[in-house]
Image (cartoon, helix red, strand yellow):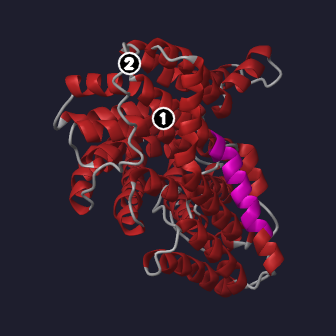
């Protein structure tokens, strides 16, 4: 879940770094993943080192030249950090401003006053779904993390009871609802109607996010009963603050990047002309980097200055926010490097070749192909685009509604079982302070539930429409 633009996806479709056969490639994939898991779980090696060694092992088992494997890994690491790293850094700055100014306290106190007990997971899934509608998953994560951790800490909730609904809301939006890049490209590839796809996507998303979020979180909290990691929790502001930002100002600052990105998406849909002056402007201000940067700059006034911070104190807050995320950036980047090594080794093409002879219904075929590519490469958007391209001929004779359902089936398959080759897996693991086993039992299972439940509702709709 690390792809941040359609352009980045095009760069991922590189020439294979090896001419290995499908059997050798399959063994290489399993061996590479096994090396990563064993190094982390048995030898307690840092995930960054394990992912680096696992990528080199994968290339070796696949018969690729060491220089080619290193190039693929570094290319994937660089593109992931370039795309996600800046967003994580900006999100960390905004989170620190929220915490030090008392803005996060204001939001959490208001949420706890309005919703408590059994209502809280439902409130979190609603907030995350709204925020996640126009946002990439990674952007939503960095915006939601301070609120999730503080609500869990102050309300004395299991982190999974609060965190899983938030993650489910963000993930479902990412995989099923345009304007996210995967669904948009699939709509184009299958010549589906965007409005119909959006409407049906919402119909599928609502029950899916309920089951994978608030309902599943009950079981996830029993399996992995953890508290928010102290090193990631925004600390209470010092007692020397005379005042703190209002709830309205704080909420407006948090939602500013959401509004800017949603505005860009709406203009793209309505205007649909890259040469149009308005669309040129919204493309810039609605890009994730500019939208989050704007929120940070606005936050310096609406949060920092509102709390009485001097210029020096705001600068100190920004500086202190960056140190804790160094490890997260390296791990997420290495996850992107492993994913790129898989793609360049030709694993995605191997899956496509295997699927050519599958004789099953189009909706199920699209889902299964996306599942296979997702498991092999770790990228939800690459899985969506590859699977959509393969089943595109089948959509030619479909009705408008069934073409839209095929888009959703592919998107649902692309979310199946996130594991060690997905940079999103490591992002969730580090932010929530879990080990690999705990992340598999919560995040990975949640992703699988989203994929399977969404597909079940898609098949049900196909019978009704």
Q: Quadrant of residue 353?
A: bottom right
- Pointer 1: residues within 10 angstroms few (<14), some, or many (20+)? many
Residue 216 shown left or right of residue 247 in the figure: left
Measured as percent of width and height from the top left, residue 247 is found at 37, 16
Q: Which residue is mark 1?
A: 143
Residue 72 lies in the magenta-colored region: yes
Secondary structure state at the residue bearing disc 2 = loop
Return the residue nearer the eye: 20 or 71.
71
Q: Is residue 378 magenta?
A: no
Q: Position of residue 277 (x, y in %)?
A: 80, 15
28 left or right of 448 in image: right
Q: Is residue 193 above or below residue 72?
A: above
The residue closer to the viewer here, 277 or 393, is: 277
Residue segment shown in magenta? 71-86
Q: Which mark is residue 191?
A: none
**How far apart, in angstroms, are the residues tagged by discs 1 and 2?**
24 Å
Magenta region, main secondary structure: helix
Q: Is residue 225 placed above or below 421 in the rendered structure?
A: above
Q: Is residue 336 left or right of residue 237?
A: right
Viewer-nearest of discs 1 and 2: 2
Say if 281 sits above or below 225 in the image: above
Along the horizontal axis of the image, is 226 left or right of 251?
left
Q: Earlier in the sequence, mark 1 or mark 2?
A: 1
Per the image, the residue denoted by label 2 is 241
- Note whether residue 426 is visible: yes
Front position in the image: 206 or 224: 224
**Crowd around label 2: few <14 · some 14–19 · many ≥20 (10 Å):** few
x and y, in percent, of residue 392 in the image: 66, 53
Residue 170: percent from the left, percent from the top?
45, 41
């Amino acid at each position: 879940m690390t792809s941040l633009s359609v352009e980045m996806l095009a760069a991922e479709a590189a020439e294979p770094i090896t001419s290995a056969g499908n059997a050798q490639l399959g063994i290489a994939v399993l061996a590479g993943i096994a090396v990563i898991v064993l190094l982390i779980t048995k030898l307690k090696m840092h995930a960054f080192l394990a992912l680096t060694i696992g990528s080199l092992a994968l290339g070796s088992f696949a018969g690729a030249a060491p220089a080619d494997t290193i190039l693929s890994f570094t290319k994937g690491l660089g593109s992931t950090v370039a795309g996600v790293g800046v967003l994580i850094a900006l999100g960390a700055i905004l989170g620190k401003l929220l915490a030090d100014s008392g803005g996060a306290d204001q939001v959490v106190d208001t949420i706890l006053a309005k919703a408590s007990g059994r209502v809280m997971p439902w409130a979190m899934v609603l907030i995350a779904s709204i925020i996640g509608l126009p946002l990439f998953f990674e952007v939503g994560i960095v915006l939601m993390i301070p609120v999730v951790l503080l609500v869990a800490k102050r309300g004395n909730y299991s982190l999974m009871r609060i965190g899983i609904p938030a993650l489910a809301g963000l993930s479902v939006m990412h995989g099923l609802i345009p304007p996210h890049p995967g669904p948009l490209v699939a709509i184009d590839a299958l010549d589906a109607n965007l409005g119909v796809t959006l409407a049906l996507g919402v119909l599928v998303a609502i029950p899916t996010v309920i089951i994978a979020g608030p309902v599943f979180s009950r079981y996830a909290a029993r399996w992995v009963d953890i508290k928010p990691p102290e090193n990631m929790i925004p600390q209470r502001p010092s007692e020397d603050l005379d005042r703190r930002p209002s709830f309205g100002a704080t909420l407006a600052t948090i939602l500013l990047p959401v509004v800017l990105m949603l505005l860009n998406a709406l203009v793209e849909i309505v205007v649909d002309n890259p040469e149009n002056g308005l669309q040129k402007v919204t493309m810039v201000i609605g890009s994730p980097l500019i939208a989050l940067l704007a929120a940070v700059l606005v936050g310096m006034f609406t949060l920092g200055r509102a709390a009485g911070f001097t210029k020096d104190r705001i600068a100190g807050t920004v500086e202190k926010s960056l140190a804790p995320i160094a490890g997260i950036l390296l791990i997420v980047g290495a996850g992107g490097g492993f994913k790129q090594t898989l793609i360049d080794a030709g694993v995605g093409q191997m899956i496509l070749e295997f699927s050519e002879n599958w004789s099953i219904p189009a909706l199920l075929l699209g889902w299964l192909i996306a599942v296979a590519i997702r498991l092999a490469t770790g990228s939800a958007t690459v899985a969506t685009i590859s699977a959509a391209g393969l089943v595109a001929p089948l959509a030619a004779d479909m009705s408008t509604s069934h073409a839209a359902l095929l888009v959703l089936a592919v998107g649902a398959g692309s979310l199946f079982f996130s594991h060690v080759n997905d940079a999103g897996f490591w992002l969730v693991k580090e932010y929530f302070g879990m080990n690999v086993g705990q992340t598999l039992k919560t995040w990975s299972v949640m992703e699988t539930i989203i994929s399977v439940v969404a597909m079940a509702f898609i098949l049900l709709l196909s019978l009704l429409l």
